[in-house]
Image: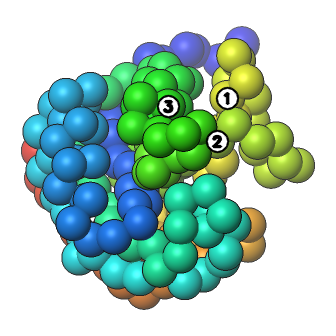
Amino acid sequence: MGTMVEKGNVILVAGLLVPHEEAMEALIRESEKLWGPVSHRSEIFDFDFTDYYEREIGPHLKRQFVAFDTPIRPDTLRESKIMSNELEARLSVGGRRRANVDPGYLDLSKLVVASTKDATYRVYLGEGIYAQPMLWYEKGSYHPWPWAYPDYRTAFAISFFNKVRTDYRAKAL
C-alpha cells in the first residue's frame, strides 16, 4: 500500500474573456473580491481562436491570463469554478454573459483548468465540474497537451505560465 501524502498549495490562475479591453479591469476587480489580489497579469490580447463565445459575449473578444497571490488547495478547484459561474451570472445582462472566467491551478508540474463540460480527457470533480489538464512541465517549460485550448498553446501563454511558475517556485521551495 502506498503512503498518502497531502498535496501542497498551488497557484490559482484564470483565463478572463471580455467583449472589450475596457471591461477587463472591472472583471479583475470582481475576481479579486473572490480570490484576493492578482500577482501576475499577461498582456491583453485578441481572442480570435474560435467564435464559440461570440454569440453570447460579442465579437472581437479580449483575453487576459491572471494569477492570484494567495495560494489555494488544489482540491478547491471545483469551488473556484462554481464561484466563477456565479460571477459570470452576476455580470450577465439580459441573460447573456458579458464575461467568461475559467479558473485553474498551476503547480510545478502542470496547469489544470476547470470546466462544466465533459470530455474524454477531463476528470469529474463533482457538482457538474470537470478538471482538464492543459499543460505539463518538462525540460524547463510547460508544454500543451493535444487537447489544450488554442490560446493556452501559444508561446505567449506558455511564457506567461512559465514566469508564474518561476515566481511560485521561488516562494514555495
Decide which of tag 2 and tag 1 comes sooner along the chain.
2
Which labelled disc corresponds to residue 172? none
**Is 127 left, or right, of 34 in this rendering?**
right
* 123 shown above or below 49: above
| Viewer-proximal residue among 106 and 23 | 23
Decide which of tag 2 and tag 3 comes sooner along the chain.
3
Find numbered disc 1 in the image and state the secondary structure of the residue it sits on: strand
The location of residue 36, given as percent across then percent down, is 16, 31
Which labelled disc corresponds to residue 115? 2
Question: Label 1 sits on what residue type?
Answer: Ile
Disc 2 versus disc 3: distance between alpha carbons?
15 Å
Quarter in which the N terminus is drawn: top right
Is residue 10 in view?
A: yes
Decide which of tag 3 and tag 1 comes sooner along the chain.
3
Identify residue for label 3.
Answer: 89
* 102 shown above or below 45: above
Find numbered disc 3 in the image and state the secondary structure of the residue it sits on: helix
Disc 2 versus disc 1: distance between alpha carbons?
6 Å
Q: Nearer the viewer, mark 2 or mark 3?
A: 3
Residue in the picture at 21% in, 66% down: 22
| Viewer-proximal residue among 123 and 21 | 21
**Is 3 left, or right, of 25 in this rendering?**
right
Q: Quadrant of residue 3?
A: top right
The location of residue 69, given as percent across then percent down, is 15, 40
Is residue 173 in view?
A: no
Q: Nearer the viewer, mark 3 or mark 1?
A: 3
Question: Label 2 sits on what residue type?
Answer: Ser
Kindly indicate whether the residue at mark 1 contacts the one at mark 2 (C-beta within 8 angstroms).
Answer: yes
